[in-house]
Image: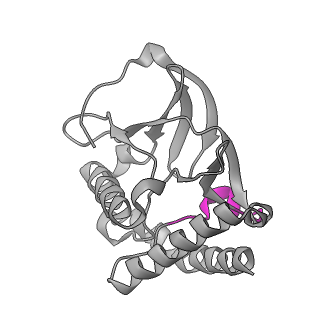
């Protein structure tokens, strides 16, 4: 991830809310994700999110959406720009397409390897997936390609004291994610 600046005039309408980030359209075909918690955690959150992205790029290779860090160079403001992925959040119905199911199996196997190697798991369920039956951090684009749009790992120890909240909810998030993944693969 490169550290560059962004142009505030290119920020458009809000398109989503994440656990920590507000997502807005940016320029024509991009989104900008602005962390609301980096103000409280300073460099800790920025360092964690950059690390999480690098780990996920290693395990999920082409599935992870390219992300550019455009926050402050001192790391106190975490802001990312990504290509806008037009599509749907991953649901069980998408498993009816053999190419999608094969990609999902690859993601599932990569997640198992990630955990086996001693890393915390990636959060694929996202906020919406905690309520509805989606893995909302995976989008399926118009070409039936799976794209991971958020690479946050389920680990909060590195961003204490705020990370204790994530640590508290991580078992619940992971249980929901595991349930949905098993359901999708049936």
Q: Which residue occupies the extreme bottom position in the image?
A: 116
Q: Is residue 78 left or right of residue 136?
A: left
Magenta region includes residue 59: no
Residue 114: give x, y in percent of width and height. Answer: 39, 77
Residue 129, image x, y percentages:
69, 62
Q: Nearer the viewer, residue 176 or 113?
A: 113
Whether residue 127 appears in magenta in the rendering, the answer is yes
Residue nearest the viewer, comparing 155 with 149: 149
* Figure colour scheme: one colour
Q: Quadrant of the N terminus?
A: top left
Q: Is 112 displayed left or right of 7 in the figure?
A: right
**Which residue: 35% across, 77% down?**
119
Outermost residue, left direction?
A: 74
Question: What residue is at 35 percent from the left and 23 percent from the top?
Answer: 6
Residue located at (42% from left, 18% from top): 8
The vertical placement of 51 against 110, above or below, is: above
Residue at figure coordinates x 32%, y 33% from the top left: 70
Give the image location of residue 102, x and y in percent: 61, 69
Say which quarter of the image contains residue 34: top left
Q: Nearer the viewer, residue 171 or 136?
A: 136
Is 67 placed left or right of 174 in the picture? Answer: left
Query: Is residue 85 left or right of 155 when viewed as pictured?
Result: right
Q: Considering only vertical position in the picture, is 86 above or below 46?
A: above
Q: Position of residue 13 (x, y in %)?
A: 62, 24
Q: In front here: 26 or 156?
A: 26
In which quadrant will I find the C terminus?
bottom right
Counting labels gives: 0
The quarter of the displayed image where residue 94 is located: bottom right
Highlighted range, magenta: 123-134
Q: Residue furthest front?
A: 98
């Amino acid at each position: 991830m490169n550290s560059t600046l962004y142009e505030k005039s290119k920020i458009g309408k809000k398109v989503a809310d994440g656990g920590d980030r507000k997502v807005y359209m940016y320029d024509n075909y991009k989104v900008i994700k602005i962390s609301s918690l980096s103000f409280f955690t300073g460099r800790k959150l920025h360092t964690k999110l950059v690390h999480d992205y690098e780990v996920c790029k290693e395990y999920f290779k082409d599935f992870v959406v390219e992300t550019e860090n455009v926050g402050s160079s001192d790391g106190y403001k975490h802001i990312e720009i990504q290509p806008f992925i037009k599509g749907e959040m991953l649901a069980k119905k998408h498993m009816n397409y053999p190419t999608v199911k094969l990609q999902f199996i690859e993601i599932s196997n990569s997640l198992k390897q990630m955990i086996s190697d001693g890393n915390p798991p990636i959060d694929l369920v996202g906020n919406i997936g905690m309520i509805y039956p989606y893995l909302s951090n995976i989008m399926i684009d118009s070409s039936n390609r799976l794209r991971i749009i958020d690479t946050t790992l389920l680990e909060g120890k590195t961003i204490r004291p705020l990370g204790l909240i994530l640590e508290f909810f991580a078992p619940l998030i992971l249980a929901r994610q595991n349930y949905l993944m098993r359901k999708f693969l049936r």
